[in-house]
Structure formats: C-alpha cells, structure tokens
Image (spheres, rainbow, N blue to C red):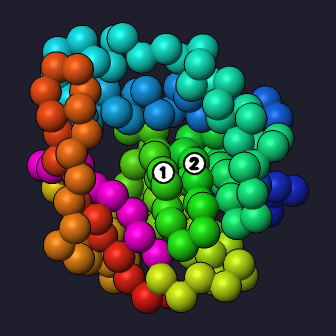
Amino acid sequence: MALFRETADVSVRPAVPGDEAPMTRVQVTAWRDTHEVALGDGVIDALDTDAMQARWAQAITSPPGPGFAVLVALDGPDVVGFAAVAPGQLLALEVHPDHQRGGHGSRLLAAAVDRLRTDGAEQVVTWIMDDDTARERFFSSAGLGPDGTERILATGVRDVVEHRWSAAV
C-alpha cells in the first residue's frame, strides 16, 4: 500500500456536466431514506427523475444568475453528495445514506459557506423539514439555528412543514 495517492480520497469541487445523474440518484436515495414517511405514500416514487436530472444539468451549465452554484462531494471518483447555493441561501445539501457521517456534509457546507462569503453574503438560510432530527443536529452543530419562520409544502398527499434555519457567515 502506498503512503500517498495522486488524488485525494475525498474532496468537494464545482459540479460539471455529467454530475447530474449521480446527483439525482443521491437526492432520491437520501429523500427516500429521510423523508418518505413525512412526504406521504408514493410521493418519492412519483418523482420525475428525468426532469430532476435535466434541472440539475441546467443548474450546472446555465445557473440562473450570479451567486448560484452547485458543488459535489467526491469519494474517490464517485459523486456521493452535493450542495446548491443561491445568494444567501443553501438550497440543497444531500449526502447518499451509505456515505453519511464521513465528513462529506461538513465539507459541502464549508465549501458552500465559502462560496456565499465570496459572493458577499452576510447570512445563510436553509430549510429543514419537520421531524428531520439528523439534519437539525447537523446544522445545529455547524452553528445554524431556527429563526421562527415556517412554510408549508403541499406534496399532493399531505402538507409538510419546513422550518427556516439561519446563521451569520
């Protein structure tokens, strides 16, 4: 076994064309693992994964404006997580369940906050679905907290409450 490798075992980089397929797989698998019960029966099975993949491809190649970016977490050459940011917002952060608790989420969050700071943000906000205690613990340990704002998502099966969390960056 070599002491050093030519490439890092784990890393975060900007998403590139071709990352949209593994990103979509990560997202659907993570949602199924975490949100299937909260969203309601059949909601995840009804997702149009082709449309999701096309939207990620567009976000990677044609961001809607300044301050939008997609980052991916790699384990060797494999995409195992991703984060998406918009001005002052963490829109998404997902890590494949098989790769959670390995530092990928922390690396993604750090890279996302670095990007937000570079773009001039003074605060980051994100949304956490009701009963997602693992995500609450993760963001709380990173210094974010609930700010009292809620929104309702209609899934077609039931309404789901999301809570806004924020922190100064």
Q: Is residue 78 visible?
A: no
Tell me residue 49's x, y (percent): 53, 17
At 49% from the left and 55% from the top, the residue drawn is 91
Q: Is residue 36 above or below residue 73?
A: above
Q: Is residue 58 above or below residue 65?
A: above
At 38% from the left and 55% from the top, the residue drawn is 101
Side of 24 where 59 appears, left or right: right
Secondary element under disc 2, as helix, strand or loop, is strand
Under mark 1, the amino acid is Ala
Q: What is the C-alpha distance between the residues marked 1 and 2?
A: 8 Å
Secondary element under disc 1, as helix, strand or loop, is strand
How many other residues sit within 10 Å of disc 2, few (<14), some (14-19) or many (≥20)? many
Q: Is residue 82 above or below residue 79?
A: below
Residue 82, which numbered label?
2
Side of 7 where 25 appears, left or right: left
Q: Quadrant of residue 46?
A: top left
Tell me residue 29's x, y (percent): 40, 27
Query: What residue is pinned by disc 1?
Result: 92
Q: Which residues are magenta?
A: 124-131
The majority secondary structure of the magenta stretch comes to strand
Side of 145 where 51 appears, left or right: right
* Precedes in sequence: disc 1 or disc 2: 2
Q: Quadrant of residue 45?
A: top left
Q: Decide which of 5, 109 is in the foreground and name it.
A: 109
Under mark 2, the amino acid is Phe
Determine whether label 1 and label 2 are within 8 Å by CB: yes
How many other residues sit within 10 Å of disc 1, few (<14), some (14-19) or many (≥20)? some
At 59% from the left and 82% from the top, the residue drawn is 121
